[in-house]
């Protein structure tokens, strides 16, 4: 089984921005749009999870040094 590599925030954000740019272009076709929309939703969920983890780490560090 392949090991899952963890991406950083900047990489996920850049990929999402690329998808958004594609949707704003004149190259949109329905079949590809469905695939990209699904990928964008997955990226958003991954980014939200990443940010929640970062928030929890910051809270933990802040509590530790109070």
Image (tube, grey):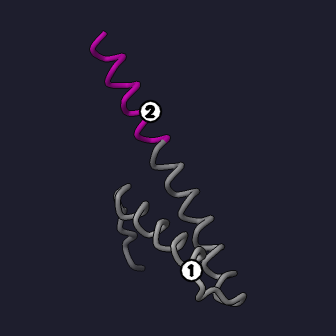
Residue 26 location (% of width, % of height):
60, 85
* Residue 32 in which image quadrant: bottom right
Q: Residue at x 56, y 80 (%)?
A: 25
Which residue is at a point 59% across and 65% down the rendered structure image? 42
Question: In the image, is residue 33 above or below residue 11?
Answer: below
Horizontal and vertical percent position of residue 40: 58, 68
Q: Point out the stretch of residues depicted in magenta.
A: 52-66
The residue where tag 2 is placed is 56
* 56 to 21, vertically: above or below: above
Image position of 15 (left or right of 33): left
Q: CA distance from mark 1 to mark 2?
A: 37 Å
Q: 35 or 7, which is in the foreground?
A: 35
Q: Quadrant of residue 58?
A: top left
- Residue pushed farthest right? 30
Specify whether residue 44 is painted magenta: no
Specify few, some or many for label 1: CA neighbours under 10 Å numbering under 14, 14-19, or 20 or more.
few
Residue 55 pos. (x, y %)? 44, 34
Q: x, y (%) of residue 10?
A: 35, 58
- Residue that lies at the very extreme toward the left in this rendered image: 65
* Residue 41's disc number: none
Dominant SS in magenta: helix
Element class at badge 2: helix
Name the residue located 36 percent from the left edge and 64 percent from the top edge. Answer: 11
Q: Does the magenta portion include 59? A: yes
In the shown orientation, is residue 41 left or right of residue 54?
A: right
Give 23 or 40, whichever is nearer the viewer. Answer: 23
Q: Which residue is mark 1?
A: 25
Front position among marks 1 and 2: 1
Q: Earlier in the sequence, mark 1 or mark 2?
A: 1
| Residue drawn where x is 72% and y is 87% of the image | 30
Q: How many marks?
A: 2
């Amino acid at each position: 089984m392949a090991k899952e590599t963890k991406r950083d925030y900047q990489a996920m954000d850049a990929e999402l921005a690329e998808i958004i740019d594609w949707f704003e272009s004149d190259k949109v076709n329905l079949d590809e749009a469905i695939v990209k929309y699904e990928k964008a939703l997955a990226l958003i969920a991954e980014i939200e999870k990443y940010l929640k983890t970062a928030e929890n780490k910051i809270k933990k560090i802040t509590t530790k040094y109070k």
